[in-house]
Amino acid sequence: MPAIADCAADPPLADSYYALLRLGGDDDDDACTKVTTTPQPVSECELPMIDVGCLTAPTGAAAAAAVGQQHQAEERAACAAAIAAAAAEWGFFQVVNHGVAQELLEAMRREQARLFRLPFEAKSSAGFLNDSYRWGTPTATSLRQLSWSEAFHLPLAGISGKSCNYGDLTSLRDVTREVADAMSRLARALARVLAESLLGHAAGERFPEGCDDATCFLRLNRYPPCPFPPDDAFGLVPHTDSDFLTVLCQDHVGGLQLMKGSRWVAVKPIPGALIVNIGDLFQAWSNNRYKSVEHRVMTNATTERYSVAYFLCPSYDSPIGTCREPSPYKAFTFGEYRRRVQEDVKKTGKKTGLSNFLLSLTVYKYW
Ligand SMILES: C=C1C[C@]23C[C@@]1(O)CC[C@H]2[C@@]12CC[C@H](O)[C@@](C)(C(=O)O1)[C@H]2[C@@H]3C(=O)O
Ligand SMILES: O=C(O)CCC(=O)C(=O)O
Ligand SMILES: [Fe+2]
């Protein structure tokens, strides 16, 4: 592993900042991202908190005998109902007893810090961690499109793949693999109860089809301190996630905000809890019942912030489909969706997302 040199570790985000400032590009017409002279105060919210122990605990014979199968079934039904209600109302919730060990998450944070402390040249060099390093916003044309952050967007297939040379980063690989496995179990259990809540038990059991190790991603995010005013650039620009659902572990620093009603609210970090959010694919599949909610990360002037996100994605050739006809959306595959998002971001600097795939501009409300 190259020598650790803190001073050269940060990506040249300030260069991007000044270049965009000089460019003076038009700010968005989007009210949510517009720079306002008097920014609206953002209140802090407590996301619905759900104990998902009954979904993640091993269902051994001893456990069944002790608790009683009837009671277990009732507990599972109540948990599923709380998850479905939060996905419909908030698009976001928090979980405890989630099955991802606290020591593992702490080890992940240590490995992540070590990884991001590598010199920028090493992180961005060809082939490093399968070319998964991203920083800033290469497509930005205005300051408000700049994400003051760096990330490794890791396809899970690549983590164990021999094609990737980890060198001295083998401990990072092992921890990453373990976190991905544990988050994957949680994400699948949640996706399944969300599908069951709309389809019934037997049909929901097969959900999500087409999602496996080769198709999901783990994203390691780092938000360096940002010396510029928080109204100039974001830590991560407002977006919805292009997946079925995301499991997120944020540290104690805070900065994540989400849209609730038509206001931004800040998510208070709760030690030990993981955050779950619905992505675009679940919103489409559920005919808008579950909400893929816009979220963003604010910058912090003094303190760096870390997060890890697990994205539950199907293979590119998977049709997304619907839980029930008629769907408000045209039929599309995940590959078509990703391509359209990338084209839009390249052309306009912004993701348009699901509205590109609506059958008509009528606002559908099914639920
Ligand atoms: C420029 C963009 C790429 C992105 C969508 C966005 O408009 C803003 C955030 C980006 C991000 C970050 C996390 C995930 O990697 C991602 C897949 C997502 O859902 O939001 C990407 C988006 C993307 O490349 O589709
Ligand atoms: O860092 C966070 O809190 C959010 C990250 C996020 O939204 C993403 O990676 O898609
Ligand atoms: Fe996100």
Image (cartoon, rainbow, N blue to C red):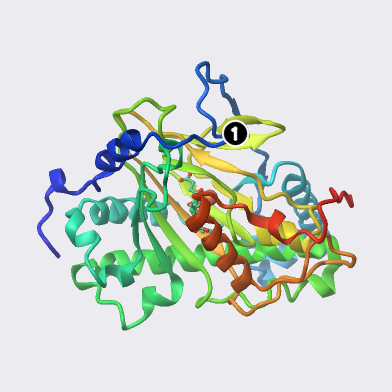
x and y percentages locating residue 269 in the rendered image = 50, 36
Which amino acid type corresponds to the residue marked 1 in the rendered image? Answer: Cys
Task: Tell me if mark 1 has few (under 14), some (14-19) or many (20+) residues whose alpha carbon lies within 10 angstroms of its own.
Answer: some
Instruction: Identify the residue shown where x is 83% and y is 66%.
Output: 323
Of 2 and 332, the residue lying toward us:
332
Residue projecting furthest to the bottom? 162
Of 352 and 254, the residue lying toward us:
352
x and y percentages locating residue 267 in the rendered image = 55, 34
Q: Is residue 280 left or right of residue 275?
A: right
Instruction: Identify the residue shown where x is 41% and y is 34%.
Output: 233
Instruction: Identify the residue shown where x is 84% and y is 63%.
Output: 327
Q: Is residue 305 left or right of residue 358?
A: left
* Residue 107 vertical position relative to residue 208 in the rendered view, above or below: above
In this rendering, does residue 57 appear at all? no
In this rendering, does residue 356 appear at all? yes
Secondary structure of the residue carrying numbered label 1 = loop
Q: Is residue 284 left or right of residue 306?
A: right
Instruction: Identify the residue shown where x is 74% and y is 66%.
Output: 65
Of 46 and 33, the residue lying toward us:
33
Displayed quadrant of residue 166? bottom left
x and y percentages locating residue 23 in the rendered image = 35, 38
Mark 1 vs ligand 1: CB below 8 Å: no
Of 146 and 211, the residue lying toward us:
146
x and y percentages locating residue 28 in the rendered image = 54, 37
Q: Is residue 286 left or right of residue 136?
A: right
Displayed quadrant of residue 1? bottom left
Q: Which residue bears the numbered disc 1?
A: 32
